[in-house]
Amino acid sequence: MVSKEILKNPDRFKLGGEKKEITMMFSDIRSFTSYSEKVDPKELVSFLNIYLSRMTGVIKRNKGTLDKYMGDAVICFFGAPLEIDHPYLACKTALETMEELKKLKSELQSETFKSIDIGIGFNTDTVTVGNIGSDDLFDYTAIGDGMNLASRLEGLNKYYGTNILTSGNTYEKVKDRFIFRELDDVSVKGKDKSVRMYELLGEIGDRIDEKVLKKAEKYSEALKIYRKGDFKSAYVIFEEIVSEFGDRSSEVMRERCELMIKEPPSDWKGVWKMDSK
């Protein structure tokens, strides 16, 4: 996609950048190091080549721009250089990536990789986009806090037991077209401003498991009570969700409520400060 756009606009084939609103996405295989220790290098590289090809295919189908691979991580963005509906196509890509992963796992011969899981984080923001590097070698890439937040969201999937997390920035632009579970308000390490996070569940019109929707509805009820500072009542509902659905996010919130019942916060504003990235 980038090369075709550069051929149409040769002036872009030089160092330089511009401020632009785009949607940035990071995806990563969970605990990949443990998988790499179980197989020989040839099998590992063979799997990675297949995996990266399939994930990249989903990005290309949705007019995304592949930024780079970092080991098993895939970094991409939507909205540059192509002018597209980037928040929508990023959501669509995230959902289709999970479906593609299911297909891939069903086709794998090796039992080692059939249990892999991934995390996806994405965020919409205005960042610097362009050709960055030296006169001899440069990449068409994006840099800025918005890119860093997408990476942080990807990493938080492991903490909350989710697969796809996005920011309020993206949510506000696509909330009428997709179904989300509002998850938490956090202050990530190194940032003063809090981030409201949402778990992407599906596109409106898709068939979504009733249990998933029921869990999201009950979680939303508990989250509202939690934000008001009624930790005892919120604890009860989060405990009910854990018992009924075995939800890791609710386990996190239940444990947090238990902590704050024992040590009530003095200035509660509904925002949890994360100690790690």
Image (cartoon, rainbow, N blue to C red):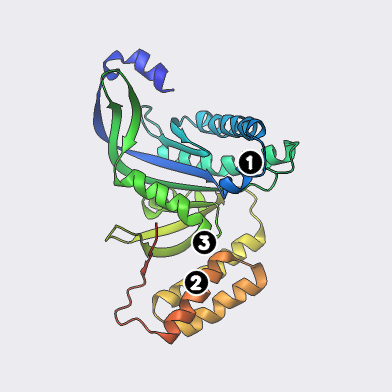
Q: Is residue 89 left or right of residue 244?
A: left
Q: Evaluate if marks 1 and 3 touch, with contact meaning CB atoms under 8 Å apart.
A: no
Q: Secondary structure at mark 1?
A: helix
Residue 235 in the image: state x and y as whole percent. 52, 80
Nearer to me, 218 or 123: 123
Which of the labelled discs sits on residue 147, or is there none?
none
Label located before the other in sequence (1 or 3): 1
Image quadrant in which you'd find residue 67: top left
Residue on which disc 3 sits: 160
Residue 194 in the image: state x and y as whole percent. 32, 61
Residue on which disc 1 sits: 101
Image quadrant in which you'd find residue 17: top left
Q: Which amino acid, by three-letter code, is at mark 2?
A: Met
Q: Is residue 160 left or right of residue 2?
A: right
Q: Is residue 226 left or right of residue 194?
A: right
The residue that appears at 25% across and 23% down in the rendered structure is 15
Q: Evaluate if marks 2 and 1 touch, with contact meaning CB atoms under 8 Å apart.
A: no
Which of the labelled discs sits on residue 253, or is there none?
2
Quadrant where the C terminus lies?
Answer: bottom left
- Residue 179, can we see it? yes
The residue that appears at 24% across and 31% down in the rendered structure is 18
